[in-house]
Image (cartoon, grey):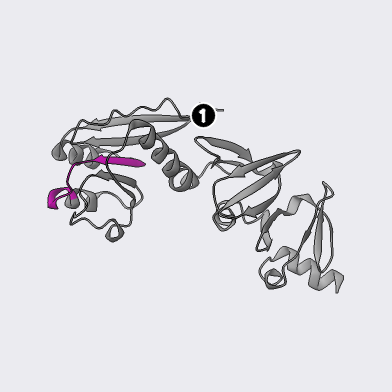
Amino acid sequence: MRPVQFYSLYIDLTQDIRLELDVFPRNISFYFTNASSLDHARYLIEQEYFEVIVFNVDNVGEKEVRLIADIPKNTSIIVISNDYDTIFDPHDIDNVILFTLKPIDPEKLQNLLIRVLSKYVLPKVKHLDHFDFFFTGSEMTKINFNDIFYVEAVGTFSNVFILDQVILVKESISSLEERLPSKNFVRLHRSFIINTQKILRISSKEIELNNAKKLPIGRSYRNKIGYISYLIDRLLI
């Protein structure tokens, strides 16, 4: 499979963090452009589109805020600063998704990039119709949608059941509900999402998958799951 490549910008006004990308999986390819001044960064942003911008600065002032505000809204921005009393409020600018205080070392920065890539960037890639990348620790794992039988909530994380394998994904079941294709995946319980292509039998209270797993149907979900609700109402009652 060809690597998924992202064009990104590293605005470093401090020269105190070396950006290294050797921890990313082989199917993720980054092309990072570096900028060491606000003017250079603004010029680059005006010339091309970046999926991710890492903004490393000691103190965020008015000039930095103006630059951030002018960045396209579909770009994900990480701001790294040591200023606790900054005038910059990241909640005021939609595309600033992480605001991290120093000190931060290269490994932590890499982990931040992995989080951003998994949660905000990869879900926007339109050609990922049959698979996606999921954050499973310090790396992302490619999962084919057709291989998934069901998803089970585990606190703030989720277990994804694939054939004879269980993968712990560091996302909530609600987050996965938004990311998985709605035409094949439905939530039938607060703790479960199923792949409708794996259904073997269905009753008014439970669904049996073709791996012999039986899962309950939550009462409050019967009117929300479309295809399953239709089968229950028209065929079984």
Percent position (x, y) of residue 113?
40, 39
Viewer-side residue, 134 vs 7: 134
Q: In which quarter of the image is residue 58?
A: top left
Residue 31 in the figure: left or right of residue 63: right
Please tell me how many numbered marks the rendered image carries: 1
Q: Mark 1 points at which residue?
A: 27
Q: Which amino acid does label 1 sit on?
A: Asn
Q: Which residue is drawn at 57% across and 58% down?
A: 174
**Quadrant position of the N terminus in the picture:** top right
Q: Residue at x 84, y 65 (%)?
A: 203
Looking at the image, can residue 8 be seen?
Answer: yes
Percent position (x, y) of residue 214?
81, 56
Residue 35 in the figure: left or right of residue 104: left
Q: What element carries label 1?
A: loop
Q: Quadrant of residue 169?
A: top right
Residue 236 in the figure: left or right of residue 57: right
Percent position (x, y) of residue 68?
23, 49
Looking at the image, can residue 49 be seen?
Answer: no
Percent position (x, y) of residue 36?
18, 33
Viewer-side residue, 67 vs 167: 167
Q: Residue at x 23, y 53 (%)?
A: 69
Viewer-side residue, 46 vs 57: 57
Point out the stretch of residues depicted in magenta: 50-64
Q: In which quarter of the image is residue 141?
A: top right
Q: Which residue is drawn at 71% across and 70% down?
A: 222
**Other residues around mark 1 within 10 Å, as few (<14) / some (14–19) / many (≥20):** some
**Quadrant position of the C terminus in the picture:** bottom right
Q: Is residue 14 magenta?
A: no
Would you place residue 9 above or below residue 229 in this image? above
